[in-house]
Image (cartoon, rainbow, N blue to C red):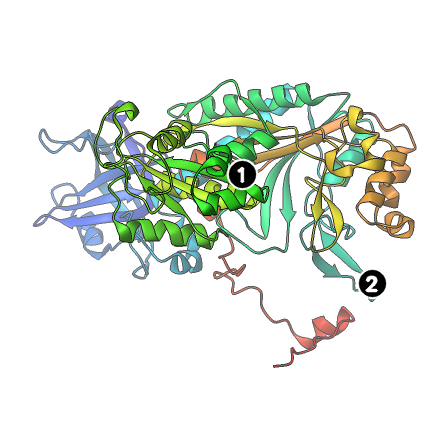
């Protein structure tokens, strides 16, 4: 080894002769004595180049610049009194160099590595190998390593077997578009990259593995956002002879144990509350609610229906919904600020937004007067009606009530989005808290109005509630599923279900989704045939590793916890991919590139 110790030295190392190797983090010339902060993966330590110890070392020190790769030999010493640096773990010691060697010079980096300053993401992704040298990115990857290590150790202790499944599989579209790989040996035919190992892990249950897991790479050709990538990683798990309670208990133990081991400084709840899908949509406007703050959606349809406000009365008469949320401390918002909120509501699909300011006074709701209320709706609503709306939405004097009216689904979506946006704007979320919950009681199907067909809410392999089986022939929209999601801080971090394990029931679900027998046999015949050989009841779940590590690291984008991610346009800026390939490769694959017409 070119080094005997890491740079994470402490007072316990005082008097030890060490050989270090790393990168020059900072260089300071103090009139004949040069100080270098030397950095490796484990830490940073000060190295002193003193001519009284070694004139040759001082000559080397004069050549050094940021990011030079350096080997240095010396003795660990206490720093002189008054020069200690309490901001560094190694700040009580320094290494007095007696030998130094430049292992490699470095160009000036395109951005600062020794400072956590804002850098354009495109530049960071192009030079990702430099970005990872920075403390923030390095810490994120270490957190990811610790999280994945814990997952493996936890499941190994629970009797799970890690099994790798293929990356090249058959295309069986289940929602997002597949990434396709043309076959050279079979012209005109394609492999697909797996969107998940869903069918493979079910086949492993048929194979009698009983408890399987895998840190699985998954691929989806879909539009990107902060919590999506074309390729991502999930902890894929499946168990035989289990029910929903078994799987949810396993998830509770896994996530709480992981946080306790990897981020013990974070707050988290050890017991996960259970929220029905219907309640989540009605109270929070989405099926992955952030429970770190209140601001629940309040239904005030009955108040609007009996009020003198024509807009509300018409919506209620047409079977729509009128709902409100309270923005704490925003009662003093001016017209421009309120207009900003109205435009936000329109962006998410509302025709408009009715703000009701309860003034800027503090006090009790019982003390509210009409003089304190500011709103275009004030002349149509009685004071008692406004007080009731405030009471239901949790508002008090000094708050701003925001009301949306229209189709229930739209109202929930708009106020759910505004709830999340306001929480960020008003700093209502504790970044050091993880608020877990299970969302349960999902419907099995949802109606696609555009396609005039049923779609799976989760995926077509999710089992229906046994009590709802008769409804599959008469009213599919009322069939409940045996699905369960784990949500945390506004993200779905794991989705799972008890699976279908009978061939006839699986075929029936495929029929309801619009597949004919020929399509079913061509796409899923292998799975249905396997079910005829004694498939056990089984269930599974797939936590998203990227998303959960993002929350553990306190980041807002999964790109910050992936070593070499794609950008928002699904491009790899480091390698310049996707890229053109030469004509021979195209010919070997028996495909032809057709230019798009302008």
Depth order, front residue of 360/216? 360
Q: Where's residue 169, x and y in %?
A: 76, 50
| Residue in the image at 63% along x and 56% along y | 221
Separation of marks 1 and 2 at Cα, in angstroms: 47 Å
Q: Quadrant of the C terminus?
A: bottom right
Among numbered discs 1 and 2, the one appearing first in the sequence: 2
Q: Where's residue 446, x and y in %?
A: 70, 42
Residue position for label 2: 185
Disc 1 crowd rating (10 Å Cα; few below 14, some 14-19, many 20+) is many
| Residue in the image at 22% along x and 57% along y | 63
Q: Where's residue 560, x and y in %?
A: 44, 46
Depth order, front residue of 172/586? 172
State left or right for residue 225 relative to residue 45: right
Q: Secondary structure at mark 2?
A: loop
State left or right for residue 372 relative to residue 487: left
Q: Is residue 3 above or below residue 597?
A: above
Q: Quadrant of the N terminus?
A: top left
Disc 2 crowd rating (10 Å Cα; few below 14, some 14-19, many 20+) is few
Quarter of the view holding residue 583: bottom right
Residue position for label 1: 286
């Amino acid at each position: 080894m070119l080094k005997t110790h890491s740079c994470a030295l402490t007072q316990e190392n005082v008097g030890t002769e060490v050989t270090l190797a790393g990168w020059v983090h900072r260089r300071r010339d103090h009139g004949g004595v040069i100080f270098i902060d030397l950095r490796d993966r484990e830490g940073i330590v000060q190295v002193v180049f003193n001519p009284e110890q070694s004139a040759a070392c001082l000559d080397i020190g004069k050549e050094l610049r940021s990011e030079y790769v350096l080997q240095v030999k010396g003795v660990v010493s206490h720093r002189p009194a008054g020069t200690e640096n309490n901001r560094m773990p190694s700040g009580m010691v320094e290494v007095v160099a007696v030998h130094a060697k430049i292992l490699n010079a470095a160009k000036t980096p395109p951005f600062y590595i020794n400072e956590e300053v804002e850098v354009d993401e495109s530049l960071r992704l192009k030079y990702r190998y430099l970005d990872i040298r920075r403390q923030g990115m390095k810490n994120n990857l270490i957190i990811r390593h610790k999280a994945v290590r814990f997952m493996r150790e936890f499941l190994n202790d629970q009797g799970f077997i890690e099994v790798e499944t293929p990356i090249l599989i058959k295309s069986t579209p289940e929602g997002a578009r597949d990434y396709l790989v043309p076959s050279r040996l079979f012209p005109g035919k394609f492999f697909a990259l797996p969107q998940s190992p869903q069918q493979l892990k079910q086949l492993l249950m048929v194979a009698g593995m009983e408890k399987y897991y895998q840190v699985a790479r998954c691929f989806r050709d879909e539009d990107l956002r902060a919590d999506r990538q074309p390729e991502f990683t999930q902890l894929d798990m499946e168990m035989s002879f289990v029910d929903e309670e078994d799987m949810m208990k396993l998830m509770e133990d896994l996530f709480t144990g992981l946080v306790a081991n990897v981020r013990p400084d974070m707050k988290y709840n050890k017991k996960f509350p259970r929220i029905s899908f219907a309640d989540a949509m009605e109270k929070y406007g989405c099926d992955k609610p952030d429970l770190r703050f209140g601001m629940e959606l309040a239904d005030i349809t009955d108040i609007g229906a009996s009020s003198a406000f024509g807009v509300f009365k018409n919506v209620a008469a047409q079977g729509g919904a009128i709902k409100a949320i309270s923005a704490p401390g925003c009662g003093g918002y001016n017209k421009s600020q309120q207009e900003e909120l109205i435009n936000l509501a329109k962006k998410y699909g509302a025709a408009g937004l009715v703000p009701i300011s309860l003034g800027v006074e503090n006090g009790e709701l019982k003390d509210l007067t009409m003089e304190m209320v500011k709103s275009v709706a004030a002349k149509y609503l009685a004071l008692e009606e406004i007080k009731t709306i405030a009471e239901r939405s949790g508002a008090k004097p000094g708050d701003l009530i925001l009301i949306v009216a229209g189709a229930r689904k739209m109202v929930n979506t708009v106020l759910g989005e505004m709830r999340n946006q306001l929480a960020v704007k008003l700093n209502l979320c504790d970044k050091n808290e993880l608020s877990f919950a299970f969302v349960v009681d999902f419907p099995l199907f949802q109606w696609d109005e555009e396609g005039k067909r049923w779609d799976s809410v989760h995926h077509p392999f999710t089992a229906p509630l046994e009590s709802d089986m008769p409804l599959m022939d008469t009213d599919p929209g009322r069939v409940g599923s045996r699905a369960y999601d784990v949500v945390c801080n506004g993200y779905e971090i794991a989705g799972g279900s008890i699976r279908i394990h009978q061939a006839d029931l699986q075929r029936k679900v495929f029929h309801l989704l619009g597949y004919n027998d020929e399509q079913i046999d061509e796409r899923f015949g292998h799975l249905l045939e396997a079910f005829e050989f004694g498939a056990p009841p089984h269930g599974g779940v797939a936590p998203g590793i990227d998303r959960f590590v993002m929350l553990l690291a306190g980041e807002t984008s999964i790109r910050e916890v992936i070593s070499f991610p794609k950008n928002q346009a699904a491009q790899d800026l480091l390698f310049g991919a996707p890229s053109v390939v030469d004509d021979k490769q195209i010919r070997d694959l028996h495909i032809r590139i057709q230019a798009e017409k302008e």
